[in-house]
């Protein structure tokens, strides 16, 4: 994969010339379940479910992102904007992700790691000799993302209202749903729509940043053993589907 050299180059530049050797030294034989996908696809929920099911460690790249923002004394939103024009912080987060994938500070039999890039970083760690990795990608329709956003930010009633009034069509992006959300006449409608568009922009900004920095697109499904569309499925059904597919791969914990 072409992006392997891009990741290695960035680590040597921003972390240090010996950064790759340090990663190799931390590699364990502990299995890793790596979950990627956009926001609102259910990846965090399923990652926590899997960690609980396998009695493993749950790790989120979002946690690293929030820790980095806190250490700089800025908000997560401010850091997201800064990452559009600066390098170093995001590379450090990616390097720490690779350390987790290697097994560093993982106390249980395995870890489940979710975020945008864990699966791609997992491919890089595989190139260094890490084994027992399975990569999952979660997706859902734009309409489903919008409905889940309404549920998260406004509440269940807004979700039900949106489900009844937002037409079932194939939308190209979240912004194309803006007129329908405006018609829902929700409390704080203007603020909700602003957050809604920011949500979409964050996904696209992350995708663009990884492409420019390393040369990978985390939405390229070639690098995943399991791909699951969560549209219209409740968390229990998705979890059952995940377990069935892991079983088909003969994924086992020693």
Image: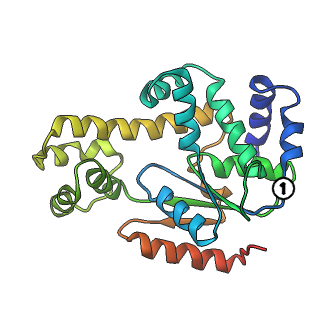
The residue pinned by badge 1 equals 28
SS for dot 1: loop
Which residue appears at 41% of the width and 53% of the height? 40
Query: Residue at 35% across / 35% down in the picture?
Result: 198
- With respect to residue 182, does 93 lie above or below? above
Q: Quadrant of residue 18?
A: top right
Asked if residue 118 lies left or right of residue 177, the reply is: right
| Residue found 60% across the figure and 44% down from its top | 217
Q: Quadrant of residue 50 in the image?
A: bottom right
Of the 4 image quadrants, the one containing the C terminus is bottom right
Which one is nearer the viewer's eye here, 208 or 44? Answer: 44
Q: x, y (%) of residue 207?
A: 54, 39
Report x, y in % for residue 96. 70, 39
Closest to the observer, 225 or 109 = 109
Location of residue 151 in the rendering, given as x and y in whole percent from the top left corner:
27, 55
Using the image, determine if residue 179 lies above or below residue 161: above
């Amino acid at each position: 994969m072409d992006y392997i050299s891009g990741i290695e180059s960035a680590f040597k530049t921003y972390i240090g010339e010996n950064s790759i050797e340090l990663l190799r030294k931390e590699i364990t034989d502990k299995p890793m379940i790596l979950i990627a996908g956009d926001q609102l696809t259910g990846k965090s929920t399923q990652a926590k479910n899997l960690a609980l099911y396998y009695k493993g460690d749950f790790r989120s790249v979002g946690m690293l992102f929030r820790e980095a923002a806190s250490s700089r004394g800025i908000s997560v939103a401010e850091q997201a904007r800064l990452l559009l024009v600066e390098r170093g912080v995001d590379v450090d987060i990616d390097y720490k992700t690779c350390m987790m994938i290697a097994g560093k500070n993982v106390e249980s039999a395995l870890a489940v790691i979710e975020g945008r890039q864990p699966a791609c970083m997992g491919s890089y760690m595989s190139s260094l000799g890490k084994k027992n990795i399975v990569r999952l990608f979660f997706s859902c329709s734009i309409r489903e993302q919008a409905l889940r956003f309404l549920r998260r930010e406004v509440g269940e009633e807004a979700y039900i209202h949106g489900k009844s009034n937002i037409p079932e069509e194939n939308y190209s992006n979240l912004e194309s749903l803006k007129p329908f959300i405006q018609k829902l006449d929700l409390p704080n409608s203007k603020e909700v729509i602003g957050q809604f568009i920011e949500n979409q922009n964050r996904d696209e900004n992350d995708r663009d940043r990884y492409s420019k920095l390393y040369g990978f697109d985390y939405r390229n499904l070639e690098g995943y053993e399991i791909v699951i569309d969560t549209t219209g499925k409740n968390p229990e059904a998705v979890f059952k589907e995940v377990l069935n597919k892991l079983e088909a791969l003969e994924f086992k914990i020693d």
